[in-house]
Amino acid sequence: MKILVTVKRVVDYNVQIRIKPDGTGVETENIKMSMNPPDENAVEEALRIKESGKAEEVIAVSIGEEKAKETIRTALAMGADRGIYVKADSNIEPLAVSKILKAIVEKEKPELIIMGKQAIDDDCNQTGQMLSSILDWSQGAFISEIKFKDNHIEVTREVDEGLEMLKLKLPAVVTCDLRLNEPRYASLPNIMKAKKKPIDQMTVDELGVDVAPRIKQLKVIEPPKREKGIMVKDVAELVQKLKHEAKVI
Amino acid sequence: MSILLLAEHNNKNIMSSTLNSITAAKEINDDLHVLVVGYKNDSVAKDLSSIPLVKKVLQLDSSEYENQLAESVSPVIINIADQYSHILAPATTFGKNIMPRVAAILDISQVSDIVKIESGDTFIRPIYAGNALATIKSMDVKKIITIRPTSFDPAPTSGGNAAIEKITQLKNQTKSEFIRREESKSERPELSSARVVISGGRGLQSSENFSMINDLADKLNAAVGASRAAVDAGYVSNDYQVGQTGKVVVPDLYIAVGISGAIQHLAGMKESKVIVAINKDEEAPIFNIADYGLKADLFEALPKLSAELDKLNTIQK
Amino acid sequence: MSNDVKHEVMEYDVVIVGAGPAGLATALKLKKLNKDLSVCVLEKGAEIGAHILSGNVFETRALDELIPDWKEKGAPIKTKVTKEKFLFLNKKSSFSWPTFLLPSIQKNHNNYIISLANLCRWLAKQAESAGVEIFPGFAGSEILYNDDLSVQGVKTGDMGIDKNNNKRDNFEPGIEIHAKVTVFAEGCRGHLGKQLIKKFQLDKNRSPQQYGIGFKEIWEIDSTKHQEGLVMHSVGWPLDNKTYGGSFCYHAENNQVYLGYVIGLDYSNPYLSPYDEFQRFKTHVTISKMLIGGKRIAYGARALIEGGIQSLPKMFMPGALLIGCDAGTLNMPKIKGSHTAMKSGILAAETIYEHLTYKKDLSIYEKKFVNSWAYKELYSARNVKPSFKFGLIPAIIFTGIDQILFRGYLPFTLKHKHSDHESLLPVNKKLKIEYPKYDGVLTFDKTSSVFLTGTFHSENQPVHLHLKDPNLPISYNLAKYDEPAQRYCPAGVYEVQRDREGLNPKFVINAQNCIHCKTCDIKEPSQNINWVTPEGSGGPNYANM
């Protein structure tokens, strides 16, 4: 079985983002970029499945500007076998990404696709579900566990009320969050080995996909600052205000 | 054209997220239809029809839909989509699971987790974990939108009398199968999604003293959180940690007890609707963002708070 | 810890610890001399530049030698210095010293205001194109020795160890990197450099080393107040006449200002808080009027090495070289260290090339360095810092005579008598300093500042600040010095916590806040704190510092 994992290059989660003074977006120049954290979990899970003997190949895919290849290299350094890079604008929408991935899936024929549930930049949480839908595959979104049984998988999903267990036929698309596993470190020798692993490169046109944007970003601003509150004189006043003024208890 | 909202429910009751989403949907269009897909869900359909803002209820009641699997529900929506200009759902794990499947088949670029509606095609949504707000315009003819429930007030629930229309089931899907659900083990709500959170900081001095926070949490039906300092000091384990490297929470009410308000902690809770701070140091930075601040020794204030809450005895659930 | 684990070995001709200007210059020059040499550079920061912090007014002399066509190659060196000011501040006003009366050591007319981090990123790209292997996120954590006790290489830190020193599930052992020559370029007070100096007695017959702590903030200010190319330095308020230090203020591009403060770590008042001195400095009318209406977008701090020639250790030993600020090549009076660091790296490369090709001993480094312009300028600057022991005004007069009249060639050399950690006086000898409250507009609390550094250490790892005697802070430092770690650390790592009644003080180490400045390692009065590398990738994530 082949496993496809998707990895996205995003602003590092430790960086305090700054909004450009002209409001056109978030500052990304000279800012540290890293692999989207849930994507690391996706790569890790794929590698564990391969190491358990259930898959022979893990392919890491990234879509975006040239530097996205660095993110593929990180996945290769963790242990993925090869990479696929598709050149596209960095603000490509999930709908377009899912179409590109479908075209790749038709070529590569993986049986399992593991993706991070959302990217920490746009926070859309759509791509995995969209891909699963246009492929007409089963879907396991926000998984915290995956088990292989015969010809299907059992996943545990984290939902608002607690956990949900599903049985999914293969092929399947699953999306994961940080609690799925603890990603391995890329060791120095593996970083060196990764330099020799192949990364196929293709363009959106070669794949025959229309990626014209449907959403226009008009402006980006900081969230409004909180108004200064009041000091209450005692606990009784606090409770009264919470009950009758703020109406939160 | 009308608009359609997918209701979140558990076949017995409407989830509160649906009520907030109805308020949001109304800002787009008065002609709101609500779809309830499930099994033995008559009471939900009835409750929905009593909501004045709802113009029509579409009900699908069939055993295959009992657990509302994404692969089952999305075709139902796709089947009736052409009647609607906007299709909406709450941006909960329920709505997030289903709506992108619909959007992809209809070739629509979904707009997720909106917090404000500027017009029928222009919305504001948080990006970078809420550290920035983006105003976006959808250029698709039809729009598919998920709504952040905490950004809108719940719709009033009585006085309405909408028609309930039964819709037919579609062919059963066999790609996925429900096994079981496990509700959260603890009696207390989960920290990331709780409506009320009460957090303790270093000021509590010991893990034994954290029991005061736990008691209050029980009274308020709240989740318990902690600052990194309290976790580092060993008062609680690290899954209680709220902050930049812990959990980010957006409850209706956040009570910070004995927490100074270092910016790393604020990063995890500053978008809470109402923030209360109890600290004996009036210079503590947390008072700068608290809506209600109480300068007091927490060892005196917490027992008093407990007593006052007992007097109230009608805590919202 | 490492004994029971098998460590893989990687071999290179040269391994360089630290991807700063010195380390990268060494790597680049080596490849120019012999492109077939295998060279690798280890960098503990998550990416190149993440741990770089510097003013910086850059003199291109060394870069001109290394990459003469740096301009055509697009080096981020664009903002030429157009105007200079030197101010004496007192509490309410300032007095501007005429520029033409400044000694030439202070003149910057051919220099550029740059972001050293961006320059290092560019140098790293050039190095990688030349075939240098650069590994960010990997800390050189241990020195390896051959049987004959020459340096064999370094071992990178183990990854995935929990706070109790047990292996976590994702444990990854460090790698041994063996090289014919190891170059240590960790910057000021590198922890491996510290070990080498001790082991090989590299500081024998030298004055004790001297250090400072430097703070830097980047502000975006109103364009009407911005003068691109302006370089401004000040002395005086808020420091007293006995404390060495002063400010810098460089107007870079995009309406940004690089604002900072340096304080000599030989200060004596245990109540002095370098962080708060910097914060209150910003309230001086000359500075505040520039900053009002602007926004602080970055903060960082790092120790600087200031001892000069008198304290410069031997820079060669069997199997290794110690270069850049790791040795102490910074020219304090010139307020520059990047160019001399790069020159020390170029010379290191030449030394290594001759060592590998003609079997010359690494000791030829000494002659190369002494004959270089770097040494000459360090020599002529040598008496400036020690003269500050006489107090600010005498020092200024002395420096005028030394630099302008004698051009730095006075017939004697003032020595440094003491190490910085010995200079603290006990609390009963000094008065508490009342620092003003932070206003959140010009001045900010420490944790808000630390937040801007982007510093991150994964939480479940051993504390990387080792106390030789864990009781000393409370049993001794607290009574004698009011535990000054609470104040000299620019990141709020060290705290003394008490219980409800204000009793039972406890020393708390918030290791995650650490920004790798090394001040604690330097200033701890009993040298009780030993800074070691945390798990690779940890530490600050400076963007353009």
Image (cartoon, coloured by chain):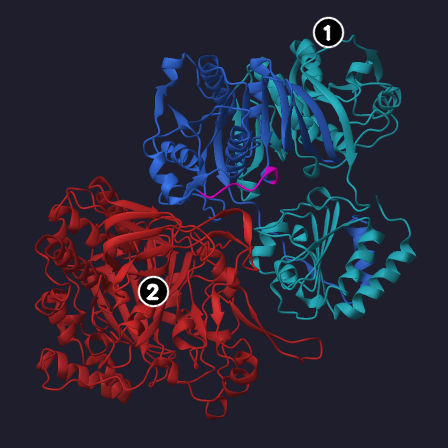
Chain colours: A blue, B cyan, C red
The reply to whether the magenta stretch includes residue C337 is: no
Question: Mark 1: which amino acid?
Answer: Lys
Which picture quadrant has residue B79? top right
- Residue C185, percent across and down? 27, 60
Pick the front one: B160 or C125: C125
Identify the chain of the residue marked 1, using the numbered disc in the image. Answer: B
Pick the front one: B17 or C206: C206
Q: Residue at x 24, y 83 (%)?
A: C386
Which picture quadrant has residue A202? top left
Left or right: where B234 falls relative to C262: right
User: In this rendering, which labeled residue sits more in front, label 1 or label 2?
Assistant: 2
The answer to whether residue B108 is seen in the rendering is yes
- Callout 2 environment at 10 Å: few (<14), some (14 to 19), or many (20+)? many
The residue beneath circle 2 is: C192
Pick the front one: A87 or C329: C329
Residue furthest to the front in view is C147
Write the start and end of the magenta stretch as one range. Answer: A179-185
Residue furthest to the bottom in view is C429
Overall secondary structure of the magenta section: loop
The residue beneath circle 1 is: B171
- Callout 1 environment at 10 Å: few (<14), some (14 to 19), or many (20+)? few
Q: Is residue A51 above or below residue B307?
A: above
